[in-house]
Amino acid sequence: MRTDPREAPALIVRAARIGAVLALALLRAVTDVRGLVAGVPPAALLGDRLAWACERLGPAFIKIGQLLSTRVDIAPPAACRALARLRDHVPPLAVPVAARALPAHLAARLSGPLTPVAAGAVACVYHGRLLDGREIAVKVRRPRIARLIARDLALFRHGARLLQRLPGLRGAPLADVAGQLGDALLAQLDFLGEARALGRLRANLRDQAAVRVPGVLEEFCRPDVLVMEYVPGLESSGRGPDRKEAVVAALRAVYHMLFVDGFVHCDLHPGNLHPMPDGSVVIVDAGFSRQLTDSGRRAFATFFYRMTRGEGAGCAEIVLSTVLGGRDGQDARGFRADMDELVRAAGGSRIGEFDLVSFAVRLFAIQRKHGYYADPQFVFPILSLIVMEGTLREACPDVEFQTEALPFVLRGLMRRGEESTDP
Ligand SMILES: Nc1ncnc2c1ncn2[C@@H]1O[C@H](COP(=O)(O)OP(=O)(O)O)[C@@H](O)[C@H]1O
Ligand SMILES: [Mg+2]
């Protein structure tokens, strides 16, 4: 972000506030004697205080905290769990303000006023009806939010670069992580991108009868307004009798994304993935989606295939072929041995026994221990699975996690023949 000199004083004040709130959070975490005496892990205390700081610092930080809460590859799981409690408690934009953001040709075709459905830090969703009777959901970005977030992100990245120079943090990939979080957040501000992602998901998942992605009304979309078909009942989703079927449908949808299409919705927390009473599942909010390269998708499918067969050495080879060059002194042999043990222990378990979070955390830890860094290509799909793992475990402990995956893994592997251009 290029800084207008007239904005410099405001930027300095903002930077000072961010610094002060973060410093206070850190201080409160390390001096929380009661928490430490009660045996709360220090990482959880820190996560808790960071969540507090994010709430005080506003939308950019709330979103960054939410994104960070899924990054068990870089932050301790206890800190992630504490951050996952971050919700955006904000009132909806007043209807007249939202209505002013609508393009004129949409406003002219509404048969009545909008009614609020949901409110977040970045956007609010409204129900509306067109003159032809169709019900629509209108997602309106809060005015001026893009500018505020861009400003905070610029400061955040700058702060990460500075911190990285401190003696204790030298070599930590803080600036990279800040960049990744920032990119994910900025992508969520562009509703034309979200509209395209929803369209792609809808097309990719069209053969999955139990999965529904709302259709987009492209002619009404703008960078700050997303118009979709309205899906009734999302507010009360997740409480129906066929929740289990719906969760299995969700699991299959995710496997389809990961192994067959390689186009992955990376933000499948319960607010975006709605199990319906009829056993179907509705997926919304595709603003944070990622396309794997085709070789990345195949590597991921092959890894999963070998994992279900307990072939640890094969899994290690896949990971070694994809990891980024790490620091000196990489230990491929130690890595293979640890991977072998990890995969053997996980082979053939039910979801009730197979703990994806601890599997992934150990996988990432083994990589770091032996001097490797995971390719973000692998990281984002694994994280998307982790994000929905809590829901799965609670709703259907008896689902054969790996068996459910197998048909999709095999389909994904077979696509190899179709795309022979890829090495
Ligand atoms: N097409 C839709 N039909 C009905 N309700 C919707 C639709 N899209 C979103 N919602 C409701 O609005 C909520 C927030 O939408 P979402 O796109 O997830 O916004 P945010 O980016 O603020 O999380 C959803 O959890 C859902 O309850
Ligand atoms: Mg959402």
Image (tube, helix red, strand yellow):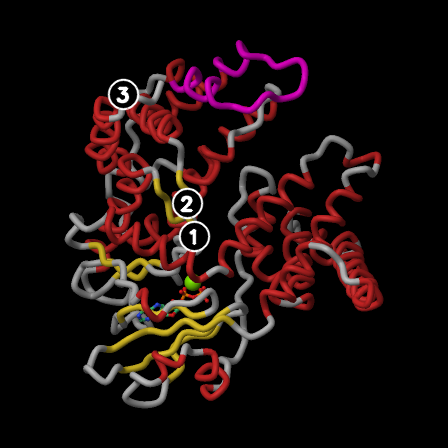
Kindly report which numbered mark, 3 or 1, lies closer to the viewer in this rendering: 3
Residue drawn at x 31%, y 58% as measured from the top left: 283
**Is 398 a magenta residue?**
no
Q: Residue at x 24, y 50 (%)?
A: 203
Look at the numbered discs 3 and 1 and tell me whether their residues touch, using CB distance below 8 Å: no
Q: Report whether 28 appears left or right of 219.
A: right
Q: Along the line of sight, which residue is nearer the eye, 238 or 249?
A: 249
The label on residue 384 is 2
- Callout 3: SS: loop
The magenta-colored residue range is 315-337
Q: Position of 98 compared to 13: left or right? A: left
Residue at mark 3: 420
The kind of residue on which mark 1 rests is Asp
Identify the image quadrant of the N terminus: bottom right
Q: Kindly report the secondary structure that dominates the magenta region of the rendered protein.
A: helix
Looking at the rendered structure, the number of numbered marks drawn on it comes to: 3
Give the amino acid type for the residue marked by disc 2 in the picture: Ser
